[in-house]
Image (tube, grey):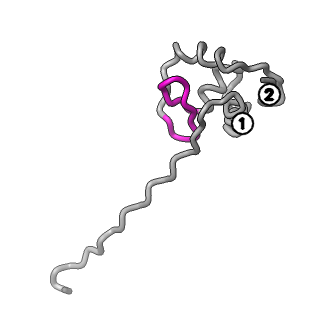
Amino acid sequence: MRCVIARFPFDLFKNEVEDVMKNIEPEAVTGESVLIGDRQYPVKQVGEVITRQDRRDFSAREVTRALTGLGFTCTAAPAPAAPEPVAAAWPSSLV
């Protein structure tokens, strides 16, 4: 599949992406991710490996669009955890 990432055209194939990534250890997922084989990778890590470009040169959206087009399952960034309510600390003399 032909796609454009960071203004550069790439011809990507699902089996080639799988072959390249099988020897790469996944980093911790903190944003968008993609399932390749049985491993969950950050989208930006995969983009860096398959394009050989710096992660700052492309967006996660560009890589997600390309990987989804190849048939991979991409997941949105996890929602931030809701802060726990803080109990008011009243001095016992006021209660």
Q: Amino acid at mark 1?
A: Arg
Q: Secondary structure at mark 1?
A: helix
Residue shown at the point (81%, 24%) measured from the top left: 2
Q: Give the alpha-carbon distance from disc 2 to disc 1, as whole Å.
A: 9 Å
The amino acid marked with disc number 2 is: Cys
Closer to the camera, 73 or 40?
Answer: 73
Q: Residues within 10 Å of mark 2 (few under 14, many from 20)?
A: some
Residue furthest to the left: 93
Residue 94: give x, y in percent of width and height.
20, 86
Identify the mark at residue 3; answer none if there is no mark.
2
What is the x, y in percent for residue 27? 49, 28
**Which numbered disc covers residue 81?**
none
Question: Which residue lies at the image location 36% right of the left edge and 67% below the top edge?
Answer: 85
Specify the quadrant of the image occupied by residue 68: top right
User: Which span is picked out in magenta?
Assistant: 29-42
Report if residue 34 lies within the magenta region.
yes
Q: Are marks 2 and 1 in contact (CB under 8 Å)?
A: yes
Residue at the image position 62 percent from the left and 30 percent from the top? 72
Q: Which mark is residue 65?
A: 1
